Amino acid sequence: MRSPHPVTKFLFGAALAALWLSPHSLAAKEKKPASPAGAQDPYAEYVWPPPPDRPRIKLEAVILGRSDVEGESRLAKALIGASPKSPWDDLKKPHAVEFDPEGRILVTDAQTGALLRFDLVGRKMDVLGTQGAVRLKTPLGLDVGSDGTIYVADIGLAKVVAFTPKGKLKVAYGRSGELVNPTDVAISPDGRRLFVTDSKAHKVVIFDTASAAKTGELGKPGDQDGQLAFPSGLTFGPDGNLFVVDQINSRVQVFSPAGDYLAQFGRLGVGFANFIRPKDAAVDEIGLIYVTDNAFNNIQIFDVDFTLLTFVGEGGTGPGRFSGVSGVAVQGDRIAAVDQLGHRLQIFRFLAPKAAD
């Protein structure tokens, strides 16, 4: 990874000092949420780091399904009854999460074979990928292009399926034998190439987005630099570098836009900045890196030099906790993460600008 300019490093240190780990940053303070009658925000107490440190991130919402977004009024229910139930009204086994250009949140559900789209502003939930010539079977990772095209890696189909923003089939990637176990997908910043983690093949497969032809591969089985063991997630940084979650090797590796190995961070262990079962990664507009760990059940946040700044969450079933954390996504000051065994989506927000104190 390109080394940041000394002035940039100073600004990161000064602006994000409050994010650095302290003895109080081990977990959010465990308190019961205030009742709806007693407070506007039921998650006001769920912050990281917890007091007495200055809070920088807070829990904003917990979504288990349609009712948490659409929220039918009591009057509507009394007049017409509750809306009819569908198999996709509640999250069953959410795997990945991503924001679209309009700020809506997309979640794959591996158990119900659907792509769910939550519009928190418009208070609406859509179900995609369950109709048409190609229907999702076991969707896992996803990404969204700048034009709104949605790319879904489906291990049941052994393909990556691309949908228009309206949910219509656009193209499928992965001819017979080209993908074995696609677990995640990322579109290159220029929109010309599609990168897919093929977990059981221990590599990243590259496709041309226009022709859907396979054009190359990254990695091979092993634990040396540039080698992979069951990669589970990938994402691009603002400089075009590719971050690959090397799951069984308990690390994240970084490749240049040309596919050359650059660096890595993390290793197997229980201390700060280590991993046991990393699952997914996201990189924001200033280069902060967010990595979920399915064993620690948290989101670790690193700076551009791969130094751990803080982490959010811990194991458990209450708000702000995770039971099988998987996918993570970032857009602006919002962080979204899905909890597989908790059957939910949780949304967090920075309380102060990330690049200025």
Image (spheres, rainbow, N blue to C red):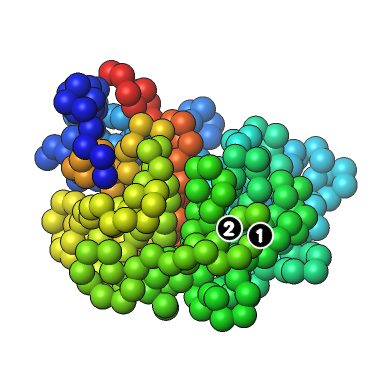
Q: Quadrant of residue 29?
A: top left
How many C-alpha atoms fall within 10 Å of the one at disc 2: few (<14), some, or many (≥20)?
A: some
> Which type of secondary structure does the marked residue at label 2 adopt?
strand
Q: Residue at x 56, y 81 (%)?
A: 177
Closer to the camera in the image, 49 or 160: 160
Q: x%, y% of residue 159?
A: 60, 70
Q: Residue at x 25, y 52 (%)?
A: 262
Q: Residue at x 37, y 56 (%)?
A: 259
Q: Is residue 57 above or below residue 347?
A: above
Please state, as top left, top right, bottom left or bottom right, where the N terminus lies in the image. Answer: top left
Closer to the camera in the image, 154 or 221: 221
Q: Amino acid at mark 1?
A: Ser
Residue 225 shows in this picture = yes
Q: Quadrant of residue 19?
A: top left
Residue 346 shows in this picture = no
Q: x%, y% of residue 288?
A: 32, 38
| In the image: residue 284, left or right of residue 1 | right
Image disc number at residue 211: 1
| In the image: residue 147, left or right of residue 291 | right
How many C-alpha atoms fall within 10 Å of the one at disc 1: few (<14), some, or many (≥20)?
A: few
Q: Is residue 330 above or below residue 228?
A: above
Closer to the camera in the image, 272 or 124: 272
Disc 1, disc 2: CB below 8 Å? yes
Q: x%, y% of residue 4?
A: 23, 32
